[in-house]
Image (cartoon, grey):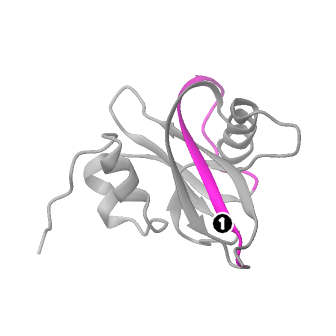
Amino acid sequence: MAGPRVPCVGAVILDDDGRLLLIRRGRPPGVGLWSLPGGRVEAGESDPGAVAREVAEETGLWVSVGRLLGTVERPGPSGETYVIRDYVCSVVGETLRAGDDATDARWVAPADLPRLPTTPGLLEALTGWGVIPLQRDER
């Protein structure tokens, strides 16, 4: 029997230089790995409301939430499935700082992404959605 499906959201935010906003996770799942800001949708909360809240909590930034970019499903540690809907966002205020369950937050150039330990499937999703260019194997 399949476990529960947990609605989650994420924010895809690029700055004027084409850098992507990432946070380093401070709590499970994926402690220490870099990922998009985001998290669970609370009961009664809309996706845009959840995205804006999570980004503010994890990065200190206020965002305008745009269109749905894509959806991914990831297995959770207790048999649940995280259904993550990622939205395009733009920064409208405040100063970047890590907060809540993020131990770091930074703007990352697409060329630097493969050198960071990222959550499983992140680079593939961003590449598939056209957010970052295809990465060449650097062997």
**How many discs appear?**
1
Q: Is residue 2 above or below residue 7?
A: below
Residue range corresponding to the magenta coloring: 79-100
Residue drawn where x is 70% and y is 33% of the image: 52
Residue sitting at x 60%, y 51%: 84
The residue that label 1 is drawn on is: 81
In reply to whether residue 14 is colored magenta, the answer given is no
Locate residue 116 relative to residue 89 in the image: left or right. Answer: left
Q: Quadrant of residue 59?
A: top right
Q: Residues within 10 Å of mark 1 (few under 14, many from 20)?
A: some
State the image coordinates of residue 49 (x, y, percent, origin top left).
75, 31
**Which image quadrant is residue 10 in?**
top right
Residue type, mark 1 in image: Thr
Tag 1 secondary structure: strand
**Quarter of the N terminus within the rendering:** bottom right
Q: Position of residue 85 (x, y in %)?
A: 58, 44
